[in-house]
Amino acid sequence: MIGIIDIGNTTNHCGLFDNGSLVKEKRTNKPWEVKEFFDVTKRLLCISVVPERKKLIEEFIGFNFVPFPLELIQLDYYSNPGEDRLANGLAAKKTVGLPVIVVDAGSAITIDLFGSPSDSKFIVKFEGGAIMPGLVSYFSSVSNAGNLLPAVKPELLDKLGKNTEECINFGAFGSLVGGIKEILRILDYKNKNLIFTGGDGEIFSKYFKAHYNSSLTLYGGLIAYNEITS
């Protein structure tokens, strides 16, 4: 069994792989549940954008994680992208092929472009992307904008709102789906492969008739693990 953990801003996505297949997965924000989940393996690769949470969970588990191998990805980028974004690129190449745009809709929405590397020592080339507020973050910001605006369940509405709640839902549709659509247009997505992932990725993928894979990041971690241990 090979374990992969994606430690995000709000939750931990855990996966167990056997012979290349995902046999078990769990999303949790409780370190002790992570420990219980990975009791069956000592081979555990970590994908993390939150060093403090990574350290805490590593201490709970009681052994060191295999670090994500950043050296597998060629970067056309001026800072350090999150490991989750890079793992998505590895998995997207195998899943739908290059060039590919990955939309990961979680706490934040990332829209990233991956192409073929110019050097054979790399698997993919990360060419950059965009970051937007996620669905829950968007609704939280709207409800905090004024005392007269109610807290509304994070849902999208693709028609004219007829009350305050519906107007907020329609605004979310315009802002988030419209924002994703405009970024994809700039990236010429109709001439590239497109795949969605993340907790809210399925919601957005329906508006683009695109592939959706809820475990894309975990599969990227597995690819990375196999590359460095082969």
Image (tube, rainbow, N blue to C red):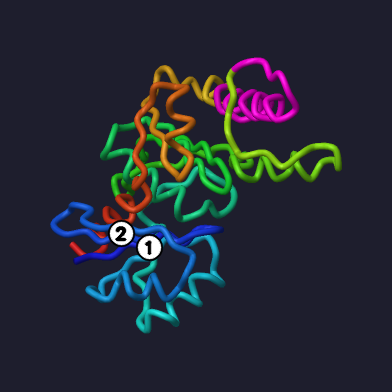
Q: Residue 188 location in percent, x, y?
A: 48, 20
Of the numbered discs in the image, which one, if any, rests on residue 209?
none
Decide whether residue 28 is among the magenta residues: no
* In this view, 35 is above or below 123: below
- Residue furthest out toward the right: 147
Of pointers 2 and 1, the one earlier in the residue sequence: 1
> Residue under circle 2?
15
Relative side of 187 to 123, left or right: right
> Residue under circle 1?
5
Specify the principal SS of the magenta part. helix
Q: Residue 156 location in percent, x, y?
A: 58, 29
Relative side of 33 to 42, left or right: right
Residue at the image position 40 percent from the left and 18 percent from the top: 191
* SS under mark 2: strand
What segment carries the magenta color? 159-181
Relative side of 17 to 122, left or right: left
Relative side of 129 to 208, left or right: right
Decide whether residue 164 is among the magenta residues: yes
Q: Quadrant of residue 141?
A: top right
Foreground residue, 96 or 108? Answer: 108
* Contact check, label 2 and label 1, Cβ < 8 Å: yes
Q: What is the three-letter code of the residue carrying label 1? A: Ile
Residue at the image position 34 percent from the left and 39 percent from the top: 213
Quadrant location of the N terminus? bottom left
Residue at the image position 44 percent from the left and 22 percent from the top: 208
Q: Quadrant of residue 137?
A: top right
